Image (tube, rainbow, N blue to C red):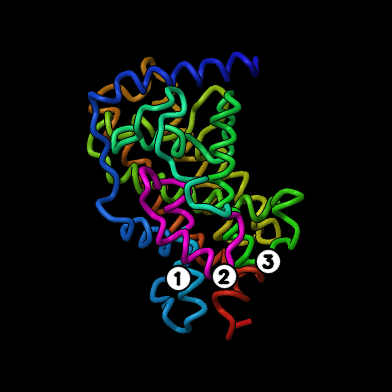
Amino acid sequence: MKNYIKSILTITLACILVISALITCYAHPTAGEHDKELEAVLFERGYSKYQSEKIKEYVTALEYASNLAIDQYGGSGEDKYRLLKKWGMGGLPLQFKTIDYSEDLFDGGKKINPNTHRMFTHQGWDIDYGDSKVNKFWKSRKAILLGTVNSIFGFGKLSAIRGYSDKCNSLAGIIYFVHILGDYVEANSKDKILYLTDLSGRIDGADMIPALQNYIDILFQDQKSSQDYKDLKKGLDDIGEKAGKIVRSTGGVNTDEEFHEYHQYAVDLLELLQEHMPRLLKNEEFFRNVFYPNEG
């Protein structure tokens, strides 16, 4: 069954490539919009990242790492890579070209462009593509964000060697999905979400809300009695159930009416995270020590 699912995923991605030339994908015009959305999920309203140079550096590092891991292609972003190296962030290769996303991994030699750059970076955080070359590429891209998260929050000195901790992976995964939700929010038609991982409802479970549920359980295991935790989990359940019905319907999101309903669930999901995540994170020692050093 597992091999069957991998084969279906591989065939689906290949089919998307065939029609990609006919579709134009629109992400946020600038990375700054993704950054604002991420900061709204991580920090309480009114939080200032300019309270110290170190805090500003850490916030910027998370944003740069997210951008490089998910959106980088065609030689862009070397300036961000160099700054992450300068700041001592982990997970980075010795040379920028090692992680430069320039060619279609299913059709070597075909250049990646704005239409196709999401193919192997927007499909899910813990996804297995069923293809060793693609999996190796995605592992190297994930390492940029995992290494940065680990360097900032100190989840484990030897994580890069032994494997990153569950908490490190969970926080990085949430940051990843906030970026994907930003792309959902930007979309104005069903064609524009073709390359994005489903919110919920996939047969193999490799979609967004089940992953978020798991990450939240891992990160906030000591806050399960808090109202923010309960409200966040219930909200995820509600949105996941409604979005999943559309994904599992015949043809999935294949009408304008279904798209508008599904799109609203993505908007609701981002707002749900922005409402509850900042307080939950602030209550965690690993996060508070870094970003609220005077409130420890």
Where, quadrant-wise, is the N terminus in this rendering?
Answer: top right
Q: Nearer the viewer, residue 240 or 139?
A: 139
In reply to whether residue 77 is colored magenta, the answer given is yes
Please tell me which of labels 2 and 3 falls first in the chain: 3
Please tell me which of labels 1 and 3 falls first in the chain: 1
Dot 1: element? loop
Pointer 2: what residue? 282
Chain part drawn in magenta: 65-92
Q: Which residue is drawn at 31% across and 46% down?
A: 185
Viewer-nearest of discs 1 and 3: 3
Kindly identify the amino acid type of the residue bearing the numbered disc 1: Glu
Q: Where is residue 284 in the image (x, y as percent from the top left)?
A: 64, 67
Viewer-nearest of discs 2 and 3: 3
Q: In which quarter of the image is residue 109?
A: top left
Kindly identify the amino acid type of the residue bearing the numbered disc 2: Lys
Where, quadrant-wise, is the C terminus in this rendering?
Answer: bottom right
Q: Which mark is residue 44?
A: 1
Left or right: 121 in relation to 23: right
Q: Which of 191 and 46 is in front in this view?
A: 191
Left or right: 32 in relation to 237: left
Kindly identify the amino acid type of the residue bearing the numbered disc 3: Gly
Vertical side of 27 occupied by 273: above or below: below
Marks 1 & 3, CB-CB < 8 Å contact: no
Q: Residue at x 44, y 34 (%)?
A: 197
Marks 2 & 1, CB-CB < 8 Å contact: yes
In reply to whether residue 1 is colored magenta, the answer given is no
Q: Residue 144 carries which label?
A: none
Pointer 3: what residue? 154
Q: Distance between the residues labelled 2 and 3?
A: 16 Å
